[in-house]
Image (spheres, rainbow, N blue to C red):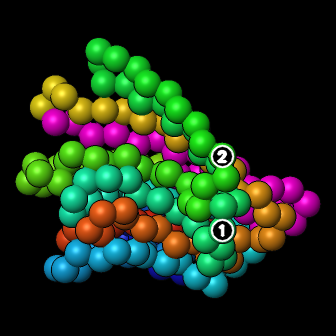
């Protein structure tokens, strides 16, 4: 595997070496090209890690939320919890029996040029076939003082190992330069 972050030169030997990512192992990356794209899919994910993590930046062509489904399951087998703060107010909500998991709320930023939500999504025990899968995501964006921070958690009620993660953007899709990097965590 080639490190996503590239290579760095060793100060001692002058040779190029892979950066130390600790327990994080790059699996794949994707950057949305010039046209808006409704979804990005990571498939054939090896079951050799303990957890998965997806890091990136996202912008919706018409705002909205980024969502995740696993193994092509679009049934009402997911649950969500959401906490949001903007420096003045805090909100919370939850939903059961939904058709996807919220991973990044980026509503409203589509009208502001070059503003993306940053996010980190953890998919815990993704290959464990003895339990349902749990996710947690931290995301947010700054609109020069009016941004938001979100914490999302979710549950996929299946004991199947996750081999495919599909990320979608409700509304008009992800804009150009939205990027995702998938890591395996030991």
The mark nearer the N terminus, 2 or 1, is: 1
Dot 1 falls on a residue whose secondary structure is loop
Q: Nearer the viewer, residue 127 or 107?
A: 107
Q: Which residue is mark 2?
A: 96
First to last magenta residue range? 121-143
Residue at 56% from the left image edge and 55% from the top image edge: 101
Residue at 58% from the left image edge and 82% from the top image edge: 43
Q: Nearer the viewer, residue 165 or 65?
A: 65
71 is higher (above) or lower (below) than 128: below
Q: Horizontal placement of 55 versus 33: left or right?
A: right
Most distant residue in the left direction:
113
Which label belongs to residue 24?
Answer: none
80 is higher (above) or lower (below) than 8: above
Asked if residue 22 can be seen in this view, the reply is no
Identify the image quadrant of residue 5: bottom left
Q: Spatial distance from mark 2 to mark 1, Cα to Cα? A: 12 Å
Residue 108 lies in the magenta stretch: no
Q: Residue 18 location in percent, x, y?
A: 46, 69
165 is higher (above) or lower (below) than 55: below
Asked if residue 106 can be seen in this view, the reply is yes
Q: Which residue is mark 1?
A: 75
Q: Residue 128 location in percent, x, y?
A: 83, 63
Q: Horizontal placement of 76 versus 117: left or right?
A: right
At label 2, counting other C-alpha atoms closer than 10 Å, the crowd grade (few under 14, some 14-19, many 20 or more) is: few
Most distant residue in the bottom direction:
44
């Amino acid at each position: 595997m080639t490190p996503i972050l590239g290579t760095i030169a060793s100060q001692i030997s002058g040779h190029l070496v892979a950066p130390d990512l600790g327990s994080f192992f790059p699996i794949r990356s994707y950057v949305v090209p010039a046209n808006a794209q409704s979804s990005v899919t990571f498939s054939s994910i090896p079951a050799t890690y303990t957890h998965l993590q997806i890091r990136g930046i996202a912008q919706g062509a018409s705002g909205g939320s980024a969502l995740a489904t696993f193994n092509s399951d679009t049934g009402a087998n997911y649950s969500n919890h959401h906490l949001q703060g903007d420096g003045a107010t805090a909100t919370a909500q939850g939903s059961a029996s939904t058709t996807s998991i919220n991973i990044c709320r980026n509503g409203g930023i589509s009208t502001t040029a070059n503003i993306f939500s940053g996010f980190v999504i953890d998919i815990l025990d993704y290959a464990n076939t003895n339990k349902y899968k749990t996710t947690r995501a931290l995301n947010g964006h700054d609109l020069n003082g009016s941004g938001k921070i979100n914490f999302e958690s979710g549950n996929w009620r299946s004991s199947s190992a996750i081999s495919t993660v599909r990320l979608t953007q409700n509304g008009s899709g992800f804009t150009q330069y939205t990027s995702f990097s998938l890591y395996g965590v030991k």
